[in-house]
Image (tube, helix red, strand yellow):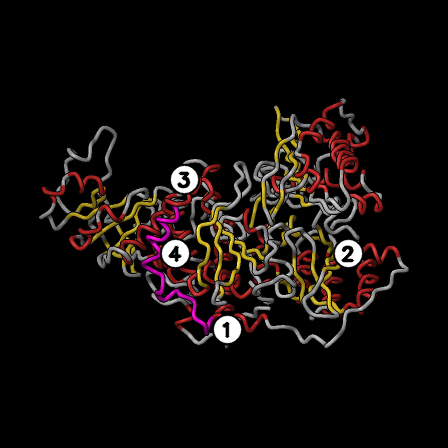
Amino acid sequence: MTTTKQIIKNSAVVNDDWSVLRLQEGEAAETVAIPVGKTLVPLKVWLAQQSALLHRADIGVWFASDERVEDLQDHVAKFSVIAVDFPKFGDGRGYTIAYRLRNRAGYRGELRAIGDVLRDQLFYMQRAGFDAFEVRADKDIHEALKSLKDFSITYQASTDEAQPLFRRVQRGA
Amino acid sequence: MYRYDQFDHQITAERVAQFRDQVRRRLSGELAEDEFRILRLQNGLYMQIHAYMMRIAVPYGMVSSDQMRMFAHIARKYDRGYGHLTTRQNIQFNWLKLQDAPDILADLATVEMHANQTSGNCIRNTTSDEFAGVARDEIIDPRPYAEILRQWSTFHPEFAFLPRKFKFSITGATTDRAAIAINDVGMQAVKNAQGEVGFRVLVGGGLGRTPFIGTEIASFIPWQHFLTYAESIVRVFNEYGRRDNLYKARIKILVNAIGIDEFRRQVEEDWKFTKDGPCTVTQAELDRVAAYFTVPAYEKLSDVTLPTDNKAFSNWVARNVKPHKVAGYAAVVLSLKNAGIAPGDATEAQMDAAAALADKYSFGELRISHMQNLVLADVKQADLFALWEAAKANGLATPNIGLLTDIICCPGGDYCTLANARSITLAKAIDERFDDLDYLHDIGEIDLNISGCINACGHHHVGHIGILGVDKSGEEWYQITIGGNKGSPANIGKVIGRSFSFAQIPEVISRLLQVYVAKRDEGERFIDTLRRLGPDPFKEFVYATPVPEDEKLKLPDYDLLKVGTPYSLPLYSPRF
């Protein structure tokens, strides 16, 4: 018996029924079988099996940290969930992938951080454009939630704030 | 200088609270060391050989006297009574406990300071010209731009986990005193034909294992656009910088691999989305920040003829007093290069004394130079003699600025877990060998830089003479480079040949200087003679006969610092 998976979404802990498909040793993007039900598939699987998956509403796609937003650019609007994988929390490419999905590709659906997702990075992730976080399973997700409020003010613009602080407020007080 | 408004205060306070909680979770075991490590580094906290070290950010090297007194307080309360100025114009304390780190940050916040991003793979403290605002060759004061960069880069959500550390340097003068060519991004203020201010931008400079001089990516970026342009550079680096090899992860490797033209194309491709967007710097914001860097209330004075009957004072004036753009004023360098003391170390008493001197003679402000000295930028020439006497009484008046003993030096094997060899002790040995002031003044300007390992914190590549600690089968050896230069123009030195033992180095330096003295033309500095003749005569003389070891340097006085920590803490250096 499995417990229901929980994620942080829109600043709350919620149950979640999306599974993440990761290619195993020996599996190829072109031929891997896609499970039934809500599934996040690797970008290269989606690119390889696009025609078969195009009409499934329960398919999302996830980016590896070395993959490019441009490869999906014209199709982002098809998805209700896109994820970005953090192979290690110190690999910061996912932040720019999120920024580009939101600000260049115009993606408005759920953007989920998966992989080595830890409490102390959530604030930055949220700013870059993530609104959902699959916190690493061995960590307390309710504790992690607190970090979204680490800062109440930020200096620079990003996905969450189109304006830098100097355009948002009257400074110098 | 810049003062915090309510927003700066709040962000700093929230950072202290965040780190306090992270330390709490580390101490309770909730956070593992590999998860905590990056968090502490981004708060300036290293785990060194003997204890924790905290590197406090001194934005572009500017310090108020109150901030300097806070450093003295930290040295007294949490450390062993001294601190160490760094080549990035910061200050670090070497003997801290993890448990104290949040309190130190809280103390710093009371004087508008922090340790944000002084380590880690993020955007580091921006460095600048220690004579900003007073130099005669200045086109603009670079400090407002450096402060705008500081705020933009502080907790930038996209750039906290870059492939590797990222350093900006910015200068507003025609002579580059900020070593912009050896930073990841160097910006030099220029004016175009219409008299508008912008920046010439260099990218991909850096030292370390593979030293590069920065390449020009843009000849003129109007000041309004310097932030968005910088952001595009960092964004491309974040995406494409190598992450598979620590030693190939800096932006210099990326720029060199794909070429400056392709790199520029990628930056401009990204920049077109943000140029003229909301992150464009407004005149109002520039004016707001620039208003903190106003001209002090200078008196209307004339230049003063200084007394010439005191040789010690004259020596000090010749070396440690620098020109000022306002008549009757001078900039003064307080030397932290004293024989027997680690270059750049200041005791708590010296910090308090320097703060008092700043209050009395220089509008309450100081700067930390990348040469690891202190600068009082606005001293009346008429006060120089009194200042000299007071500085001398506190060991701050060694007349050696720019001379052989004004050594740049990293902490080296005595403190640092990365080092292959001792740096501080070697600096001490060189100091002792060349203690004749007349000889030092005769040799004149020369940059001697020492790094204890290839990470090059002591900038050995750009020393006129550079010394690099190398490891050969577990033993420490030193490789000598000559002909490096830190700016105007910057270039990388060349290795002269096989390496030497610790006890041979003073003799090697002596031989290099002997060649210079024998071959120099009238008025030539060491680097000029070296450039004219090339390295060969220097190499040949150094290796012509066996280099004897100085037996004194094998005595316990010169041994590696082995004293352990007095603290018995669990979360502590792996060596103990």
Tag 2 and tag 1 share a subunit: yes
Tag 3 and tag 1 share a subunit: yes
Task: Please report the bounds of the magenta region as a residue range.
Answer: B263-285
Q: CA distance from mark 3 to mark 1?
A: 39 Å
Q: Residue furthest right?
A: B309
Q: Which tag, 2 or 1, sits closer to the chain's start?
A: 1
Residue B287: which numbered mark, if any?
A: 1
Residue A48: which numbered mark, if any?
A: none
- Which quadrant does the C terminus of chain B fall into? top right
Residue B396: which numbered mark, if any?
A: 2
The residue labelled by disc 4 is: A124
Question: Mark 4 and 3 residues: CB-CB less than 8 Å, in contact?
Answer: no
Dot 2 amino acid type: Leu
Q: Is residue B215 above or below residue B509?
A: below
Q: Nearer the viewer, residue A119 or B326?
A: B326
Dot 1 amino acid type: Asp
Which of discs 4 and 3 lies nearer the camera? The answer is 3
